[in-house]
Image (spheres, rainbow, N blue to C red):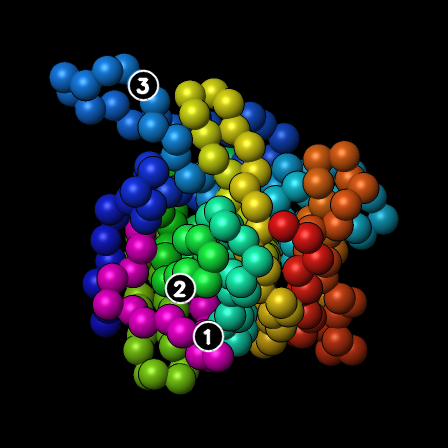
Amino acid sequence: MAGSSSRARSARGGLMRRAGFGVALMSIALFIPGAASTATPAIVHPALPHIIHRGNGTAQSSNWSGYAAYNATFSDVKGSWIQPAANCSSTTTAQYASFWVGLDGYKSSSVEQLGTDSDCAGRNKPSYYAWWEMYPNPSHQISGFAVRPGDSISADVSRLATLYTLTLVNNTTGQRFSTTQTSTAANSSAEWVAEAPSQCIIVLCRVLPLANFGTITFTGSYATSGTQKSISGYANDSITMTDTTGTTVRAQPSGLSPDGTRFSDTWRHS
């Protein structure tokens, strides 16, 4: 089993993901004793969908793209994807893209999730890694767990009472990570998401540029509430990522496959 590290995943600040629906972002600032009281910008991977519009099975969000299932009490969510390559050839600044499955977060204040990133540290400087989080606790980068473009990744979050087991497998390399954590969560939604993180200084937050990940396809997408069903077996929303005005599409999911277990998500704009 690969180890995990709670160290910051960016030199500019701590990295975490957030949960909740319709609430303000928690700000994060790093202060060094004896130094000037200047806040360090923090990269925040919120599990909160900043909803711009929602209705009739669709939603627009400034930081999420994918699917959320709800109106059930869930005990498991799983999905697989091929790790996308980040196209960093046309950017001179940092860009980010996260891919994950999780329980909660769509309509609740906690989230149990894990996944991978395809980021750009600058022009032609891609970065890939895996992580897990039990919000409101900080996220953990999974040390020693190699992630490369083209790798087949499978993720699973399962619950037994208040015990949550988060498992990530690199099917290409054979590496496997698993951790069991305790939480009293709502278990009210299940998600399969491509996400753009945010950067916060004190209380001011902005969604960061989305790294060009091309197209990612989620397969084997199931959730369990009593019995295991595909996404289409539950009430669900298709979520399109847009700018804050809802006019420019940043990433967009396809429709579900006939059996409801598969969809693609395509980058449109940073």
Residue that mark 2 sits on: 128
Residue that mark 3 sits on: 38
Which label is found at residue 149?
1
- From what the image shows, is residue 261 above or below residue 37? below
Question: In terms of sequence position, does the residue under pointer 3 or pointer 1 come before the other?
Answer: 3
The answer to whether 141 appears left or right of 220 in the picture is: left
Give the amino acid at mark 2.
Answer: Tyr
Q: Tell me where residue 93 appears, x and y as whole percent.
A: 49, 47
- From what the image shows, is residue 156 above or below residue 5? below
Which label is found at residue 53?
none
Q: CA distance from mark 3 to mark 2?
A: 30 Å
Residue closest to the eye, 112 or 162: 112
**Secondary structure state at the residue bearing disc 3:** loop
For mark 3, does the 10 Å Cα neighbourhood hold few (<14), some (14 to 19), or many (20 or more) residues? few
Q: Residue furthest left?
A: 34
Residue closest to the eye, 8 or 107: 8
Name the quarter where the N terminus is drawn: bottom left
The answer to whether the residues at label 3 and label 2 have Cβ atoms under 8 Å apart is no
Question: In terms of sequence position, does the residue under pointer 1 or pointer 2 come before the other?
Answer: 2
For mark 1, does the 10 Å Cα neighbourhood hold few (<14), some (14 to 19), or many (20 or more) residues? some
Read off the magenta span.
Answer: 140-162
For mark 2, does the 10 Å Cα neighbourhood hold few (<14), some (14 to 19), or many (20 or more) residues? some
Residue closest to the eye, 121 or 72: 121
The answer to whether the residues at label 3 and label 1 have Cβ atoms under 8 Å apart is no
Q: Tell me where residue 173 appears, x and y as whole percent.
A: 34, 83
